Image (cartoon, helix red, strand yellow):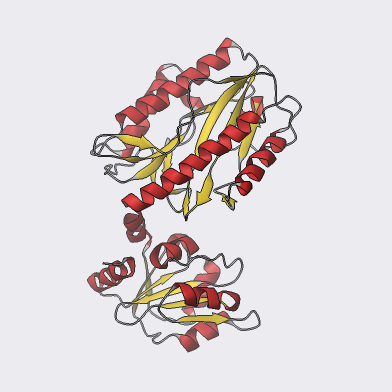
Amino acid sequence: MTKLDQIRLYLDQKGAELAIFSDPVTINYLTGFFCDPHERQLFLFVYHDLAPVLFVPALEVARASQAISFPVFGYVDSENPWEKIKAVLPNTAAKTIYAEFDHLNVNKFHGLQTIFSGQFNNLTPYVQGMRLIKSADEINKMMIAGQFADKAVQVGFDNISLDATETDVIAQIEFEMKKQGIHKMSFDTMVLTGNNAANPHGIPGTNNIENNALLLFDLGVETLGYTSDMTRTVAVGQPDQFKIDIYNLCLEAQLVAIDFIKPGVTAAQVDAAARQVIEKSGYGEYFNHRLGHGIGMDVHEFPSIMAGNDLVLEEGMCFSVEPGIYIPGKVGVRIEDCGHVTKNGFEVFTHTPKELLYFEG
């Protein structure tokens, strides 16, 4: 059964006539065609009893038509997209419609309401469920993305210098990845030195790499349609014992959580396994985010590995394990690997060493 067949079956089970998709990643997942429409309109219409229809900006029609076998329609910038959609669709009388509410902004929703008078229902949970368990092929692609992430962080290590700034190091990482055929990082690369790393989502800048401090790298790549994400924190020069102790505590929390993961435990229990290590040492308030996020075609996707999430883990689920300790003005440490649940545990996609690495200042 194809992914589109799964959507049709779900529509039949719900007594619905139509599913509408506007998320480019979901459309890629269902059809194998990807484009970023920017401010233009992109929709996939899946009927329970008619051929699907893909609606794209006019400049994407030729490429889309080569990638898929069902009808493709486009519009030029001077046309009203909603009027064009209404004109090309085979049926606009659906009474029950499903759409991904997480990706349906107000402008798109109002536009669709000028075409359809039926009731809209949320398809997001079903699509999340479809994407939750990765196939062997998907996991293999994520392994490859992880290998490139390991290469990228090694480039960062090779460019550590007190004469370099955070953004200097980022430029070297991303330049080398381009040379190796990586067209896109999976998110904005972060290189954060000293106290700047004490902000979980700090902003890299023209700060020179600090001596006798910790240096945090958070990066990933997108390749073959799938993403990677990893974080390593390293020592430059000789950081004081307090910083080293915080690093070792964070590493212990990560290793405990990874060792705990297996089919049958819940997402909340995995979060607790790491969090309890940090809380017992008195630093719980400085671990101020969930333990992990799902990963796949999107770098952040369902599920969240966090307190209150009773989702039972199954083989093939993919997510990050990334405890962090951030003490403002003093130190910031995060250690992250993404991986997949196996029959007996958890296999990571990235393999850069995690014992504290030292680099000359």
Quadrant (top left/top right/bottom left/bottom right) for the N terminus: bottom left
Left or right of residue 109, residue 304 in this image: left
Q: Nearer the viewer, residue 15 or 357?
A: 357
Residue 308 seen anywhere in this rendered image of the structure: yes
Residue occupying the point 32% across, 65% down:
3
Q: How many marks?
A: 0
Q: Give how far across and how far down residue 17 sits, in percent.
A: 32, 78
Going by the image, does 219 lie left or right of 270?
right
The image shows residue 254 at horizontal and vertical percentages of 41, 27
Residue 200, visible in the rendered structure: no
Q: Residue at x 57, y 10 (%)?
A: 241
Answer left or right for 243 relative to 23: right
Q: Is residue 246 above or below residue 35?
A: above
Q: Image height check: is 66 above or below 254?
A: below
Taking depth in this image into account, of 173 and 287 the one nearest to the observer is: 173
Q: Residue at x 37, y 75 (%)?
A: 46
User: Extreme top residue here?
Assistant: 241
Task: Decide which of 152, 78 is in the foreground and name it.
Answer: 152
